[in-house]
């Protein structure tokens, strides 16, 4: 059976490193790094994610400037909040928890965040740097996938990589990052014909479709590396709800060489890359180099 790509353990190790990095930088700079998470409304999944992010901030010694807005908040109120945070010297990272309620438009808000404080790497300037292969703030989930593959020394150069999902948040940036590591990248999506024919060629298979257990063992090349980005809450026959990924873990682990668990795979890596990005901005904004 496959070896686990253990995101939880790597996330803990990286958070310990960030904590000591913050301690030494704080002594020079005279303040903590700060992250502001903007949340609107009361989407229960978002509330859990935001709480996890704020808890993680606290654990590594980062200040958290969370702002929770009511479901009826206007676009103008959010714009004003972003402007204030852009100006606030104690804030190094700003993130809007998506999705927003339907009456709000996320894109102009994402564009309004100062690119140097764009902890989620979704500002067009940072996306453009990714396309060009220049250093910059990178989207957290894709960066977390890449960091986990690196930790297990999974070679990418010349390999067939297939990404299922083409969202701007996950699929597209992952494909660009794999390309930057010289993988041969195929992107599959909801209109793709013969999905299993394509996935069975993959040495590296990244799944971000938001479809519970879409990928089964027959779709996976023996010995492949399978990364499951999906987080889906499903209710089983007995009425209990549980989290599953986009990969049918029990069958795929029989054929893959490496596989990420859900939970405990990409989820904790995503939070960690958010912290990493904020520390990176902090060091960058204060004129300290950070690797
Ligand atoms: P999305 O809905 O924006 O995009 C889904 C993509 O999958 C689309 O491009 C679509 O074309 C493709 N797709 C849908 N059904 C398909 C099918 N049957 N076959 C092939 N392709 C199909 O979702 P997203 O924001 O990219 O997120 C994807 C998943 O990752 C979700 O389960 C989400 O909860 C999860 N996610 C996890 C983390 C994390 O931290 N682990 C972060 C972000 C998103």
Image (cartoon, grey):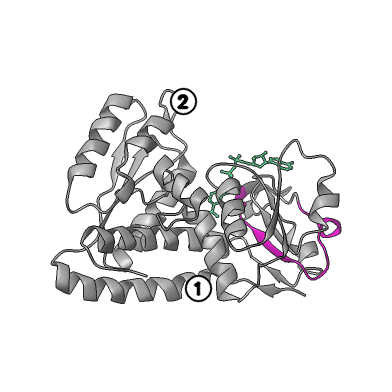
Above or below for 218 versus 27: above
Above or below for 23 versus 66: below
Residue 123 place in picture, x, y as percent: 40, 42
Dividing the image into 4 quarters, which one contains the N terminus?
A: bottom right
Q: Residue at x 80, y 63 (%)?
A: 251
Residue 68 place in picture, x, y as percent: 31, 40
Question: Mark 1 vs ligand 1: CB under 8 Å?
Answer: no
Mark toward the start of the polypeptide (1 vs 2):
1
Position of residue 55 in the picture relative to residue 257 (left or right): left
Task: Residue 110: name its quadrant.
Answer: top left
Residue 56 place in picture, x, y as percent: 36, 62
Q: Which mark is residue 10?
A: 1
Q: Quadrant of ligand 1?
A: top right
Q: Please tell me which residue lies in front, 240 or 76.
A: 76
Question: Mark 2 vs ligand 1: CB under 8 Å?
Answer: no
Residue 123 in sight here: no
Q: Residue at x 29, y 32 (%)?
A: 78
**What span is colored magenta in the figure?**
215-232
Q: Which residue is mark 2?
A: 102
């Amino acid at each position: 059976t496959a070896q686990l790509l253990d995101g939880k353990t790597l996330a803990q190790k990286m958070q310990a490193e960030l904590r000591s990095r913050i301690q030494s930088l704080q002594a020079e700079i005279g303040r903590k790094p700060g992250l502001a998470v903007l949340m609107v409304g009361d989407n229960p999944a978002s509330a859990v994610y935001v709480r996890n992010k704020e808890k993680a901030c606290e654990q590594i010694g980062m200040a958290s400037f969370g702002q929770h807005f009511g479901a009826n908040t206007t676009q103008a109120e959010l714009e004003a909040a972003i402007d204030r945070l852009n100006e606030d010297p104690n804030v190094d990272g700003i993130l809007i928890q998506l999705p927003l309620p339907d009456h709000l438009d996320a894109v102009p808000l994402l564009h309004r965040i100062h690119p140097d404080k764009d902890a989620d790497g979704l500002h067009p300037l940072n996306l453009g740097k990714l396309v060009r292969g220049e250093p910059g703030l990178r989207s957290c989930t894709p960066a977390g996938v890449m960091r986990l593959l690196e930790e297990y020394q999974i070679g990418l150069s010349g390999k067939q990589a297939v990404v299922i999902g083409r969202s701007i948040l996950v699929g597209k940036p992952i494909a660009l990052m794999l390309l930057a590591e010289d993988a041969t990248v195929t992107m599959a999506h909801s209109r793709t014909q013969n999905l299993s024919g394509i996935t069975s060629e993959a040495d590296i298979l990244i799944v971000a479709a938001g479809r519970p257990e879409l990928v089964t063992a027959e779709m996976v090349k023996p010995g492949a590396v399978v990364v499951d980005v999906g987080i889906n809450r499903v209710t089983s026959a007995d009425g209990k709800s549980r989290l599953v990924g986009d990969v049918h873990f029990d069958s795929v682990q029989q054929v893959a060489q490496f596989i990420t668990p859900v939970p405990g795979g990409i989820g904790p890596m995503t939070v960690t890359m958010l912290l990493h990005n904020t520390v990176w901005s902090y060091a960058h904004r204060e004129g300290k180099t950070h690797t």
